[in-house]
Image (tube, coloured by chain):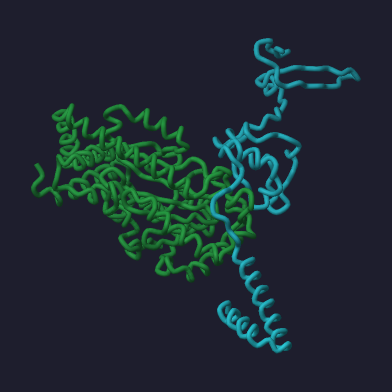
Amino acid sequence: MLCDSCHERDAVVHLTTIENNAVHQLHLCERCAAERGVETTVATPKHPLAEFLHQQVPQPNAEGMRCAFCNTTMADFKATGRWGCARCYTNFEAGIRELLRRVHGNHRHVGRTYRPPMTETLERAAALGELKERLRRAIESEQFELAADLRDRIRVME
Amino acid sequence: MSVDLSLLPDGGVGWLDASGPHSDIVLSTRIRFARNVEGYAFTGRARDGERLRVLAQVREAVNAVPSLHEAVLYRLDELPPTARALLHERHLVSKELAGLDAQHPLRSGAAVFLADGLGVMVNEEDHLRLQSMRSGFALQEAFAAIDKLDRDLGARVPYSYHNEFGFLTACPTNVGTGMRGSVLIHLPGLVLTKEIGKVLASLQQMGLTYRGLYGEGSEVVGNFFQISNQTTLGRSEEELLDQLLRVVGHVVEREAEARRVLLRDAGYIIEDKLWRAYGTLRYARSLTFDEAMNYLSGVRLAVGLKLISSLSVYTLNKLLIFSQAAHLAFAEGRALTESETNLARARYVRRALEEEAGSVG
């Protein structure tokens, strides 16, 4: 469809106006729309990577979604090509999975796995606690061989 | 406040000493891991206070990491632009961390820990960018060092990690292993024999990419290329490393072959060209950076071909770093205009070559 104003370029902006109770449809190209002061909603990414990603990320209704932790929106990501925090990966998970498939040809990490120290420390403490409880019971029930074994294991862990 | 690089072993450029394998062709090998600290927004989104807390937390942990026991901390956010440029020219910090990139102004909490062949940039695009640097073509050694550093640090600082996506990074192109291995390689033979186009095209098919001397966005000058892995997700660190090792190994062989062909088929033309490059460096009174890089490339090739024997690769490597603008200004003790820089550069190069000249010719 050609632009109603210049009749040269393709119309990309479809403007509906109401004047004197009559509905007018106006189809304009980007330039003529800009001349009339109509803002086009086509966001132009400022970052070269973002431009590429812009084409890659599926554009569902996630547009208005906002990361609860860092306030990043899909629009922010498109402008910068950067996520705002680790939670964004969970909040925008579906879109990210598709994006990673296109960028890396895969979305599943197969490299080394990692457990943050907190969990490890907690798990170690939990295991130690359990061993100590078993030791107490072993002594109570006079299973001295088992108790000696448990005591050795506790000593190693501590 | 100025920067005291003498605190660093070898001024932080031990990786230039040309002691590693294939160092006539490969200048250096680097591996970096991108990591983020759990509990904070990524650097670009974090508030000043959060970045400072990240730095404090990392600083505490670094004290307990054996390989960083003697590390020196530079607070980029407290250094003047000249000192930051110096660290950048030495390839010890990125342009972004140094706040020299118009797009990324200097951030509070921007810092780097530097130890022998290892570095940890704090508050770069990701909270942590661990780096391992080695002379020559030494991917396995560089990997062993960074892997150890990563495990030691990761046991003290909780990293952001996702079971499906791996290590989480600000930019989706780094997610997964967060690993980028890169080899800084000099390929004048392939450029002169016009084979380079084919080689670079094949890199991309193999999942690798190339950049200039200063990484992302930098131009190729002096026939120096940085070859690195393109993807970081869907393959293990070992697989990525192995791929880089095989492909770069192949490029090194092709470069060596190209050099043999040049010498065999165009001996005197090449010899003349390279001696002219040497002559220019030895006697020119003004040199731009690009000129210096191109002539140094020629002289480096001549040394590799054993046409010039009394000049060491180490000296040439040092010239690459020390003939840059911030280093020249630092040596002169004042800010220099562009033409003054070119004069200072020519003077610096001339002296360095004179010192080693002895029996050249």
State whether residue B220 appears in this view: yes
From the image, which quarter does the C terminus of chain B lie in? top left
Q: Is residue A35 left or right of residue B114?
A: right
From the image, which quarter does the N terminus of chain B lie in? bottom left
Front residue of A117/B83: it is A117
Of the chain colours in the picture, the one used for chain A is cyan
Q: Is residue A96 left or right of residue B85?
A: right
Q: Which chain is green?
A: B
Q: Is residue B324 left or right of residue B92?
A: left
Residue at 55% x, 43% y is: B173
Q: Is residue B4 above or below residue B184?
A: below
x and y percentages locating residue B73 in the rendered image = 44, 64
Front residue of B292/B229: it is B229
x and y percentages locating residue A79 in the rendered image = 62, 39
Residue at 68% x, 12% y is: A6
x and y percentages locating residue A53 in the rendered image = 60, 36
Q: Is residue A35 above or below residue B94?
A: above
